[in-house]
Amino acid sequence: MTTLIDREGIAVRDAHDPLCGKRDAFVIPDGVIYLDGNSLGPLPKAALRELKLAAEHEWGEGLIRSWNAAGWFDLPTTLGDRIARLIGAEAGETVCTDTTSTNIFKALHAALNLRPGRSVIIAEGTGFPTDVYMAEGVASARPGVRLKLAGIDAPEIEALLGDDVAAVLVNHVDYRTGVLRDMAALTSRIQAAGAVAVWDLCHSAGTMNVGLNSANADFAVGCTYKYLNGGPGAPAFVFAARRHHGRLKQPLSGWWGHANPFAFEHSFQPGDGIRPMLCGTQAILSMRALAGALEVWDDIDLLEVRQKSLALTDLFIALVEENCGRFGVTLAAPREHAQRGSQVSFRHPHGYAVVQALIERGVIGDFREPDFMRFGFAPLYLRYADVFEAASILHEVLANETWRDARFAKRATVT
Amino acid sequence: MTTLIDREGIAVRDAHDPLCGKRDAFVIPDGVIYLDGNSLGPLPKAALRELKLAAEHEWGEGLIRSWNAAGWFDLPTTLGDRIARLIGAEAGETVCTDTTSTNIFKALHAALNLRPGRSVIIAEGTGFPTDVYMAEGVASARPGVRLKLAGIDAPEIEALLGDDVAAVLVNHVDYRTGVLRDMAALTSRIQAAGAVAVWDLCHSAGTMNVGLNSANADFAVGCTYKYLNGGPGAPAFVFAARRHHGRLKQPLSGWWGHANPFAFEHSFQPGDGIRPMLCGTQAILSMRALAGALEVWDDIDLLEVRQKSLALTDLFIALVEENCGRFGVTLAAPREHAQRGSQVSFRHPHGYAVVQALIERGVIGDFREPDFMRFGFAPLYLRYADVFEAASILHEVLANETWRDARFAKRATVT
């Protein structure tokens, strides 16, 4: 690869990166350029330390006493409050619990219960599939409730907004294209139509200063295993704006959401604040690993994260377009900063095989149907030199047609 | 404590215990007699080994590739099949996933969907509270569905059975008293009334040869953090009898339950077999610890577990009644083996303080409102000598009235 951008300039950028010290907080295997942190973040050293402490000391030695002594029972709220800072929420508005799918279910039910005269849920037909599946599930079990899909029933969400709409579920960043929505503007339009805005932050939390309260969002959900690096399948989160507290009602009314879970009362009384969004006993070992992972963020300026994210994606787009365009690669991510998340997708007719060939060379990205090569750029551990090297290896794979080898032929992939 | 049962006889019983070697598979802190394995099982050494492997190697080195390479994506079914052997199910009928509360929600919805003309759910008013709370949640979001509680709306489940009943949720072992239900007989009566039987195995799995299929059970749920020793809040399980497969429908229809989760289709199509009971991305670190914990069971004869469980509880009842009855302690567990789970509860007017005084002496049991002192007897790591010592310390606490000390006064407890 010959390029107008030189390696010396790249080295200068890394040397002046205010986040460069954060890479040491992670375990990054030798020979790997990890562009899949948008699917599963790498292992933070603090997560490993906390996990070991939780297993050996808290569980092994503390046994049942650790529910109180080690703060296990409070983890959904204490971790929720730490996540809150990263998504522009106040303390007490977020709990860390269950899965994104389950939290979507709760948030949509809670939204419908806030709008009793309305019967339509809007979701995105091109959004992450489980969002649609969960909305289908909510609609299937509530007589009269209907689901309408932007991108299928109408081109855009705005065209579906009407006085029958109770809730709109929106992906902040599209999982395939990396397109970033304007949260404040769309929330305002949704609310102007009388509906409730539910934001899915899976692909934005940890890459930018998500401003839930400044955008006046109603609900939000998200996972912690992508850019927040909480570990495989780490517990998700759910946010409900404080103005809705006291009226939060959703049917997964388990004992962790009860006003007094240890009184063992025989009828459900919802707890205060955000607590009614909790349900059952949580996977504590996974939560304790997440607690370690969140330490990495304690001294982080999210504006610096966003600036570096845009600089990394700008660099990758420039390098790939300059060198790989003639091999059939086309950009599927927005050029405008205001519309770009922290991932860049390129389309290629043989995208699956190209991604497999890259992985063999240590450049780990992923593939999404039908032809999206998806590369995530996590500002805490990626260097400008990594981006340069990844683009260089992509160029080699395409120029040499390495991807044509039979071992890169298509099989099922896992997110 | 003077007793007709002597220490020498106890030592002989331990020496002849076919399960005695299993204690070495666990981390048991020095000075602790752990009678709370019915709330949180102790740390199996294999769980710690697998957790370390999962974090350092699979996550740290394998990164996203471990979803396939380390079998993460299949853990709900592979662990489900290993649990199946312990609960009398066939392979393919059980998945390990989510929480007991969430799985109750799914099972009750699936049961209602199998009985479309019926509208009543029966649960136990004196059962574990979250069972009732989840049944309330199901009823609240399905118009026309009503909840009736045995112990409140009628003394017994049988009196509530009628041609409007769709589903009956029953605790196999009562969490407070340790009473064991006759699963085959009650399932038969429930089904004779045209309803579907949903069993909660939280307090029986891992203590006996639970026979779901021999009892013709329809659905079952349970946790893995009590007698199965999977770790705090370890993922739960849900069973659906094979005869119901192909008709399983529940509204938590997330992408893990989809027929083809990696095709990213835009409408939900349920997977085969038990898969529709899955929902979202699971907490893999917690599941990997559970995978280690389940290894301990691989060569276990569950009949031996049940025999030892009864022998341990017999011994504890005999010792406490012989020595402590005059201090106001009364048995709240069944004397008949056929009705006894693997825990023994005694009632005492100052039960809370007595339990705290015992904990200070290293005998860890727990307290349940209003006056139940609850002691669990896990046959894999408890010795007859531990039971003797625990009864002896209980005698001392009562005889010396140690429990009257102000530091044992009542505060909130955690399960």
Image (cartoon, coloured by chain):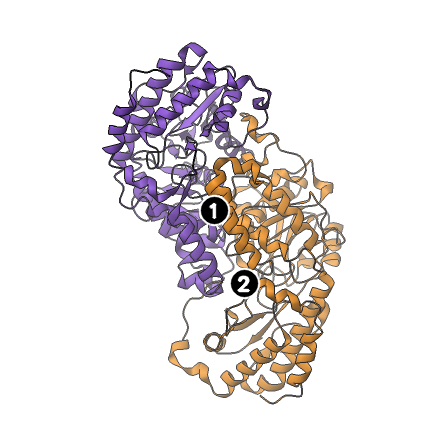
Chain colours: A orange, B purple
In the image, farthest residue toward the top: B326
Q: Is residue B2 left or right of residue B408?
A: left
Judge whether A326 appears above or below B200 on screen. below
Residue B240 appearing in the image: yes
Judge whether B321 appears above or below B382 on screen. above
Decide which of A413, B48 is in the foreground and name it. Answer: B48
Q: Quadrant of residue A26?
A: bottom right
Please state, as top left, top right, bottom left or bottom right, where the N terminus of chain B lies in the image.
top left
Q: Earlier in the sequence, mark 1 or mark 2?
A: 2
Judge whether A226 appears above or below B5 on screen. below
Q: Position of residue B171 (x, y in %)?
A: 41, 29
Report, in whole angstroms, how far the alpha carbon at label 1 lies from the one at label 2.
23 Å
In the image, farthest residue toward the bottom: A2
CA neighbours of label 2 inside 10 A, class few (<14), some (14 to 19), many (20+) = many
Look at 49% across and 53% down and name the residue there. B281
Q: Position of residue A215 (x, y in %)?
A: 75, 54
Query: Dot 1 corresponds to which residue?
Result: A56
Query: Dot 2 corresponds to which residue?
Result: A42
Q: Is residue A39 left or right of residue A169?
A: left
Look at 43% across and 33% down and name the residue there. B32
Q: Position of residue A156 (x, y in %)?
A: 66, 62
